[in-house]
Image (tube, coloured by chain):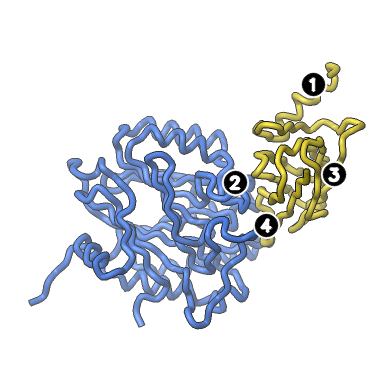
Chain colours: A yellow, B blue
Amino acid sequence: MNPTRRSMMCAAAAAVCGLGTAGVYVAAAPAEANEKVIKITAKRFEFIPGHVTVKKGVPVVFEFVTEDVFMGFNLPDFNVRSDIVPGKTARLRLVPDKTGTFVFLCDVFCGSGHEEMNGKLTVVA
Amino acid sequence: MAIELSRRQFVQLAGISGMGVVFASALPGMAHAAGKEDFYFVQMSDTHWGFQGPPNPDAKGTLRKAVTSVNALEYEPDFIVFTGDLTHTTDDPVERRKRMAEFRDIVKDLKVKTLRFMPGEHDASLDYGKAFREFFGDTHYTFDHKGVHFIALDNVSDPRAMLGDEQLAWLAADLKQQKTDAPIVVLTHRPLFDLVPQWDWATRDGAKAIELLLAYQNVTVFYGHIHQEHHHMTGHIAHHAAKGLMFPLPAPGSQPNRTPLPWNPAEPYKGLGFRSVDANDDAKAFAITEYPVITKA
């Protein structure tokens, strides 16, 4: 890792909260060339796409934007989340360490449909 | 010959007759402490004034019916606390204030000396609590009542469902003034613990508050948000969720989404209600009694 990239990773830690479960690595740095990027758009009150499939053990970088208000992306089963601030791209790197289908949700109250704003992440072997 | 019952005797009899009394929360510090008096308060929650939809075809009447039922209680409570989501959310600041004004007009008919209010995310998360403060005052505060220290925490004015470092420091400073065996009641809207993070039934930094509170021997938490009765322990701290007064929600984690339970015409208002909380001076416990919306025909 070169110094520039390391400094970017440190800065990212303030913007993105990853609580460091085993096999999970998160940061807000741009994706490496060999990493799969999954773009997710948040808008009241849905994520687009609302269902994402990834492979266990294969690193992915989620890139989030919001079309309207301040949102959040929370994947409780992997103990990771990110704020999604209008006008900025938020990034969350994940190495899924277990298979199954897991709920992700908006965890920043955004209005009358907030409670229904969620999606699914399926991790296959 | 007429028999006059004390509030405590009334609750004990109610428990025998199946009114739903739960002797749930240990408050051992209260048992024989000098100067302590028994008292009770009423918790009402999640009234969601302004909501419209099939989950409650009597959306405009339910709160008024609950007010009537509270006023019909045998003894006047010492105070009534509303633990958040007084109003249903709206993007329109004018409509938000209209709903708060209407809510305030309805609950002013409650026969009680003291009303206390707390915000829920529907009241406060879209404007960081601005409208709530205009109508109801501070979003977090403390008060003492007959030997019990009450702490109302705000985990909703930050839309990220956080208490925040400033409020946590305020809580720590307040707790430092209390003896470790002081009876303490914490009031919140969201659960302080991770009940179901997949449903956003949590407070992101709630564990920090619980860590502070665990140093005290007699802490009980009453909260709302989940629209149903629920009891949970974190260490020696009991957390009691209250029913709502607009629509019930499913049991924690029981289905993929936390959508309101459908209205059942055969059992109108089922799952809705309010509770009384008795702090007895010799029972070493809070007695929680759950009431339906309509208590008298």
- Label 4 element class: helix
Give amino acid for label 4.
Answer: His
| N-terminal label among 3 and 1 | 1
Give amino acid for label 2.
Answer: Ala
C-alpha distance separating marks 2 and 3: 26 Å
Q: Chain of mark 3?
A: A
Q: Quadrant of residue B114?
A: bottom left
Farthest residue in the front direction? A125
Which class describes the residues within 10 Å of circle 2: few (<14), some (14-19), or many (20+)?
A: many
Tell us which disc is closer to us: 2 or 3.
3
Which class describes the residues within 10 Å of circle 3: few (<14), some (14-19), or many (20+)?
A: some
Q: Chain of mark 1?
A: A
Tell us which disc is closer to us: 3 or 4.
3
Pointer 3 residue: A38
Q: Are marks 2 and 3 on the same chain?
A: no
Pointer 2 residue: B161
Give yes or no for contact between labels 4 and 1 (Cβ–Cβ under 8 Å): no
Q: Nearer the viewer, residue B145 or B279?
A: B279
Q: Is residue B58 left or right of residue A84?
A: left
Against B67, residue B131 (above or below) is: above
Residue at 30% in and 55% down:
B23
List x then y, in percent, for residue B106: 46, 70
Give yes or no for contact between labels 4 and 2 (Cβ–Cβ under 8 Å): no
Give yes or no for contact between labels 2 and 1 (Cβ–Cβ under 8 Å): no
Pointer 1 residue: A7
| N-terminal label among 3 and 4 | 3
Q: Is residue B7 left or right of residue A79?
A: left
Give yes or no for contact between labels 2 and 3 (Cβ–Cβ under 8 Å): no
Residue at 78% in and 26% down:
A9
Which class describes the residues within 10 Å of circle 1: few (<14), some (14-19), or many (20+)?
A: few
Q: Is residue B227 visible?
A: yes
Q: Chain of mark 4?
A: A
